[in-house]
Image (cartoon, helix red, strand yellow):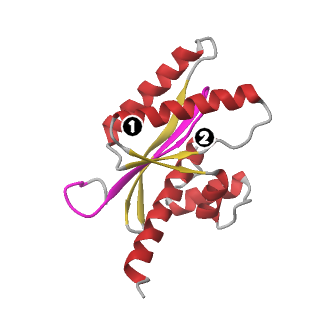
Amino acid sequence: MCRNRQSGDFMIIMGIDPGIAISGYGVVCCNGTEFEVLDFGVLKTESSLSVPERLKAIYEGYLNLIENYKPAAIAVEELFFNKNAKTAIAVGQARGVALLAAASRNVKVYEYTPLQVKQAVVGYGRAEKMQVQEMVRVLLNLKTIPKPDDAADALAVALCHINSLNLQRYITTECRF
């Protein structure tokens, strides 16, 4: 479907599960309700680096992915409340770098809460992590659950956005009164 990008009505979506040590990404090509995984993985930074150096490495990693896949949109998981303020701040900084990378390449950004992602992928907003990962595997027709978890989470965020787009299209075309 997406291998031959000259034909068909397809869209490439990049999902991001931000983090300072490990930031997951997933790149999915969709054509209506058909999906193809183009890539997934993680951007890792060493704890021995300073925070600015880590953020720069993440930023450059996002830019490389954007340049390589040219996504139409980037879906980023919103920060959920974390009891550890230091962790929350670091993840927030990594989210900011993702938003900056997208904006610097004029790619639209969409943000989804963990509850929205679970609802879109599993159909239940309080689903367990393993349920989400299994549904990612099933929906994307993968042989195994994507590893590491951060990459599976990023693919789930991309699927959430694709489901949101498909719902908008359905409402626009089918639900006219």
Q: Which mark is residue 132?
A: none
| Residue furthest bottom as drawn | 177
Q: What x and y, as percent, mark residue 44?
A: 55, 26
* Position above or below: 102 against 146: above
Most extreme residue toward the right, as rendered?
83
Q: Which residue is mark 1?
A: 103
Q: Residue at x 62, y 11 (%)?
A: 48
Q: Please tell me whether mark 1 sits on a helix, a strand or a loop.
A: helix
Please give the residue where the numbered disc 2 appears in the rendered image: 150
Q: Is-magenta flag for residue 19?
A: yes
Indicate whether 161 appears above or below 109.
Answer: below
Name which quarter of the figure residue 136 lies in.
bottom right
Q: Which residues are magenta?
A: 4-26
In magenta stretch: residue 64: no
Task: Check disc 2 and give the amino acid type.
Answer: Asp
Front residue of this view, candidates 102 and 160: 102
Q: Residue at x 52, y 22 (%)?
A: 55
Q: Is the C terminus in the top left, top right, bottom left or bottom right quadrant?
A: bottom left
- Image location (x, y in percent) of residue 38: 39, 48
- Give the residue displayed 24% in from the left and 64% down from the top: 8
Q: Quadrant of the N terminus?
A: bottom left
Q: Secondary structure at mark 2?
A: helix
Q: Position of residue 41 (x, y in %)?
A: 51, 38
Cα distance between the residues tagged 1 and 2: 23 Å
In the image, 89 versus 32, the foreground residue is 89
Using the rendered view, name the quadrant where residue 176 is placed.
Answer: bottom left
Q: Can you give x and y, in whole percent of width and height, for residue 95 in the image? A: 55, 35
Point out the residue furthest to the front here. 177
Labels 1, 2: front one? 1
Residue type (three-letter) at the residue carrying disc 1: Ala
* First in sequence: mark 1 vs mark 2: 1
